[in-house]
Image (cartoon, grey):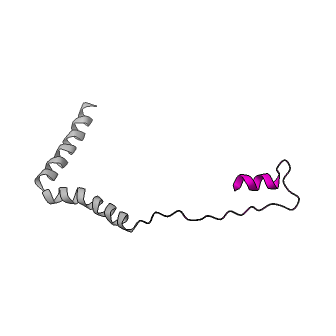
Amino acid sequence: MREYLTKVLAFFAKEFHDVRRQPRLMLSLIGGPLLVLAAFGATFRSSNPFISTGLVWPKEGIPGMDQDESAKFIG
């Protein structure tokens, strides 16, 4: 278990030092996702679409269910 933990920590340390030595890499790691989020946020339209609901009922009905009460429940 100790060897596994040492390898994992060595990997993270290597990646941390690589990022620290390359400031443009840090800019791309942080700035890239922020740029994507900004582009999405600029084009996002917050609107609630009107959704129509149709109630399909068999001619003979459903035992134990009233068609009018079900329609009121759905709205």
Residue 44 part of the magenta-drawn span: no
Pick the quarter of the image with the N terminus.
Answer: top left
Q: Is residue 43 above or below residue 1?
A: below
Q: In this view, does 46 lie to the left or right of 32?
A: right
| Residue furthest bottom as drawn | 43
Count of number-bearing discs: 0
Rendering quarter of residue 29: bottom left
Rendering quarter of residue 58: bottom right
Q: Where is residue 44 in the image (x, y as percent from the top left)?
A: 41, 65
Q: Is the magenta stretch mostly helix, strand or loop?
A: loop
Question: Residue at image x 75%, y 56%?
Answer: 71
Front residue of 29 and 63: 63
Q: Where is residue 65 in the image (x, y as percent from the top left)?
A: 82, 50
Q: In this view, does 63 lie to the left or right of 53?
A: right
Rendering quarter of residue 6: top left
| Residue furthest left as drawn | 21
Q: Is residue 26 left or right of residue 37?
A: left
Front residue of 32 and 13: 32
Pick the quarter of the image with the C terminus.
Answer: bottom right
| Residue furthest top as drawn | 2
Q: Where is residue 62 in the image (x, y as percent from the top left)?
A: 84, 53
Question: Residue at image x 17%, y 43%?
Answer: 13
User: Magenta region: which residues?
Assistant: 49-75
Q: Is residue 64 left or right of residue 50?
A: right
Q: Where is residue 68 in the image (x, y as percent from the top left)?
A: 80, 55
